[in-house]
Image (spheres, rainbow, N blue to C red):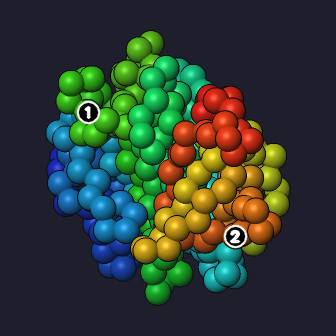
Amino acid sequence: MSTIRWVETTGSTSTDLLARCSAGEAAGGDALATFDQRAGRGRAGAEWVTAPGMGLALSVAIDASGVDLSNVASLVHPVGLAVRTVIAEAGAAGAALAWPNDIVVPYPEAVEGWGRWRKLGGILCERHASGLIIAGIGVNLDYPADRLPVAWATSLRQAAPEWDGDREALAERIVAEVCVADAHWREHGGNLSYLAEELARSSAWRDTVITARAGAHTLGGTFRGVDDSGAALIETPGGIERWISGEIRHVRAACDDGYTEECDRPR
């Protein structure tokens, strides 16, 4: 049985949970959560700040012992599917995964780099020498439309007006789903072949023209899914390329390249 420890405010739930694990005060399956995170981390050094009372910052400790190092990075995908499941249950229709670690929902209007998707949450999985992975999860909950931090963001309140507002229950459901997802992931040694169909159905970028970026390196093509290790598969004129790090952004379809506006439509 997993346990959530709630704190009124913190710099980073992931940093604090790792410290508790290192001190023997928490173990795999335990979680730390707050509605007021001041110095959370996103990918590539980005911040994830939770305005007091408006978002959920939640970290779950996962025991990855027994999983080959080459497959450890794949954990972000089953964790993402777990969070997506709970978000959809709360009423966010069309919730999807935007590779590699964002939870998004469809909107009528397009935003540059995101198409008709808006970011509702994000995940950062960090592996430590102890063999534990700390899965940091951030979800925008109660931001009103005029308080959203960026143009491509949304919140559960905006995406699911019928949500009952029970934030603690939402966190408990996320932890429960993450622990189930973690157990299946470990049973398969971190190989994602068992999730291939679900990942394909849940992909925001599927069959969409995108640009992938990692530092100064960019790659353009059509997103065709993820492989068994979680790497993105991008179809280019030279064939399928594996993309293992960085970010992917939506590119509006260009008819003279053989694509149509259909590529720009959420599924």
Q: CA distance from mark 1 to mark 2?
A: 33 Å
- Label 1 crowd bin: few (<14), some (14–19), many (20+), radius 10 Å: some
> Residue 186's spot in the image, x, y percent?
71, 67
- Which residue lies at the image location 36% right of the left edge and 79% below the top edge? 22
Verify CB contact (< 8 Å) between mark 1 and mark 2.
Answer: no
In this rendering, the answer to whether 56 lies above or below 231 is above
In this rendering, the answer to whether 43 lies above or below 64 is above
> Residue 36's spot in the image, x, y percent?
20, 45
In this rendering, the answer to whether 184 lies above or below 51 is below
Q: How many marks?
A: 2
Q: From the image, state whether disc 1 or disc 2 is nearer to you.
A: 2
Amino acid of disc 1: Leu
Instruction: Indicate the quadrant where residue 206 lies.
Output: top right
**Mark 1 or 2 closer to N-term?**
1
Left or right: residue 167 compared with residue 188: left
In terms of depth relative to the viewer, which is nearer, 117 or 53?
117
Q: Secondary structure at mark 1?
A: loop
- Which residue lies at the image location 45% right of the left edge and 23% below the top edge? 109
Residue at image mark 2: 242
> Residue 210's spot in the image, x, y percent?
59, 51
Residue 137 seen in render: yes
Residue 80 seen in render: no
Instruction: Indicate the quadrant where residue 220 lies.
Output: bottom right
- Which residue lies at the image location 38% right of the left edge and 48% below the top edge? 138
Query: Which dot marks residue 148?
Result: 1
> Quadrant where the C terminus lies?
top right
- Which residue lies at the image location 53% right of the left edge and 81% below the top edge? 131
Q: Secondary structure at mark 2?
A: strand
Left or right: residue 68 compared with residue 47: right
